[in-house]
Amino acid sequence: MRLAVYLTLVLPALFALLAGPLSARLDPRHATWLLTGAAVALAGCSTLALGLLGAARIHRGVRGTAGARCRLETPNTAAVWLTASASVLRDRIYSASRFSERTAEEKVMVEKFLGRTERYNQLILNAVHRLGLTSIDTSAAPSARELIKQCPEVIG
C-alpha cells in the first residue's frame, strides 16, 4: 500500500514533464481537455493519498474510543483541521471554474465535481466533530496570515 500511496504523490511531477510535449502534438482543444482532466484526476488521487497517510498516522498515534475525544500521543506533534462550509466550497468552485461562462455540458461536469466535494467535505466535518479533533472554520475567509496566527492559539 505504501508504494501506491506515494506513487500518487509522485505522478503529478512526471505528468508535468509530459505536458509540454503532449500539448505540442495535440490539437489545442483536445490538449486542454486532456491536461485538465489529468490534472483533476491527479489532484484527486493526491488528496486521497494525503488523506490516507494522515488517517494512518492519526490511527497509529491517537488513543481513544469511538465518540470520545481523541488525543494525539505522538511526541512534539500537534494537528489542526482547516474546515469550510459547503457554501464556501460551492462559491470557490463556481468562481475558479468560471461556471457562468461554461457550456451546459461543462456545467454538468462542474456540478458532479461539486457534489463529490460536498460529500467528502461532510464526511471530514463529521469525523472532526465526532472525534473532537481541533479545527478552524475557514468559512469567514481569513487570510493565510490570520490562519497562521490562529493555529498556535487553537492548538494551545
Image: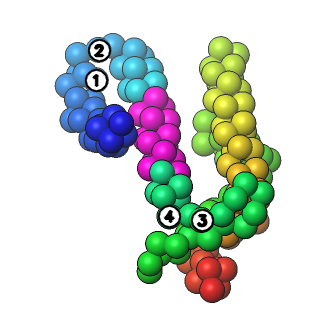
Q: Secondary structure at mark 4?
A: helix
Q: Residues within 10 Å of mark 1 (few under 14, many from 20)?
A: some
**What is the distance, in whole Å, between disc 2 and disc 4 at their CAs?**
48 Å
Q: Position of residue 124 (x, y in %)?
A: 68, 49
Residue at the image position 72 percent from the left and 36 percent from the top: 119
Q: Which segment is the magenta one?
A: 40-55
Q: Does 129 lie within the magenta span?
A: no
Q: Main secondary structure of the magenta part?
A: helix
Q: Secondary structure at mark 1?
A: helix
Q: Residues within 10 Å of mark 4 (few under 14, many from 20)?
A: some
Q: Secondary structure at mark 3?
A: strand
Under mark 4, the amino acid is Gly
Under mark 2, the amino acid is Leu
Q: Is residue 108 above or below residue 19?
A: above
Q: Which residue carries the number 2 mark?
A: 26
Mark toward the viewer: 2 or 4: 4
Q: Earlier in the sequence, mark 1 or mark 4?
A: 1
Q: Is residue 73 above or below residue 51?
A: below
Is the Cβ of the residue at disc 2 closer than 8 Å to that at disc 1? yes
Q: Which residue carries the number 4 mark?
A: 61
Under mark 3, the amino acid is Arg
The answer to which image quadrant residue 97 occupies is top right
Q: Which residue carries the number 1 mark?
A: 23
